[in-house]
Image (spheres, grey):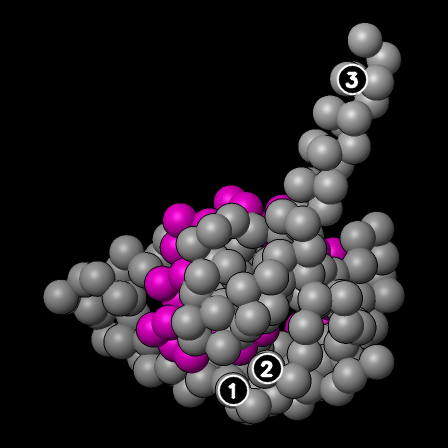
Amino acid sequence: MKKLVTPITDEDILGVQIGDVIELYGVGITSRDMAHKYIVERLMESQNLSSEDLSIYHQLKEILNGGFIYHSGPIVRREDDRWRFISSGPTTSIRTELYQHRVIKHFNVKVVIGKGGMGELTLKACQDNKAIYLHGIGGAGVLNAEKVVEILDVFKLKEFGTPEAIWKIKVEGFTGIVTMDAHGRSLHKEQLQKVKSKFKEIIVGGM
């Protein structure tokens, strides 16, 4: 078990590799495909940002510099004028593949958490920008939510709705497995190659 605490450094990331189990501490955001599209196409590419968008952009620059993005659409409850995650499991990451590499580079994101792995664009971004992909624990949304010890803010709630909003969160002991590292290795890719090789052996052997 290895521990990462935000703000995470390049040296921290280079010290882990695929297969390592990580306990994550610190501040980051939830962001699904709608939020990634907004971050790239509006915040990064638009020349005419509203005052709200400009404020969110500068806040994300601070949050994500050495921070993390969690691909999750949480179930949230309002209690005593505060938000609390009830359940927060990882969602399918590949839906953000078109944008993730650009977000990693622009904001200096160090950890991306989700499920199912990601593609070559994100793998290269992890290698070039010293970042990792953590495979979150699926089917354990309530347990994951317990690791979110505080909701610090929320962006675009009215426009995007609860699951797609950008939640600024603080986590303590959030656990995941490194399946894409900064050394250019992807456990998803390697396992797929092994499966294909084994499948070919079975087919050829059965002929």
Residue bearing the label numbered 3? 203
Where does residue 44 sit, x and y in percent of width and height?
26, 66
Q: CA distance from mark 3 to mark 1?
A: 44 Å
Residue bearing the label numbered 1? 10
Q: Quadrant of residue 18?
A: bottom right
Does residue 181 sit above or below 199 in this rendering?
Answer: below
Count neighbours of disc 3 (C-alpha within 10 A) and say few if under 14, some if 14 to 19, many if 20 or more. Answer: few
Residue bearing the label numbered 2? 13
Quick check: 7 left or right of 198?
left
Along the line of sight, the residue nearer the viewer: 24 or 80: 24
Q: Residue at point 81% right, 8% down? A: 207
Q: Is residue 95 magenta?
A: yes
Mark 3 lies on a secondary structure that is helix
Q: Earlier in the sequence, mark 3 or mark 1?
A: 1
Q: Amino acid at mark 3?
A: Ile
Mark 2 lies on a secondary structure that is helix
Q: Quadrant of the N terminus?
A: bottom right
Highlighted range, magenta: 83-112
* Residue 193 in sight from this viewpoint: yes
Does residue 52 sit above or below 188 in this rendering?
Answer: below
Q: Residue at point 62% right, 77% down? A: 169
- Extreme residue toward the top, this view: 207
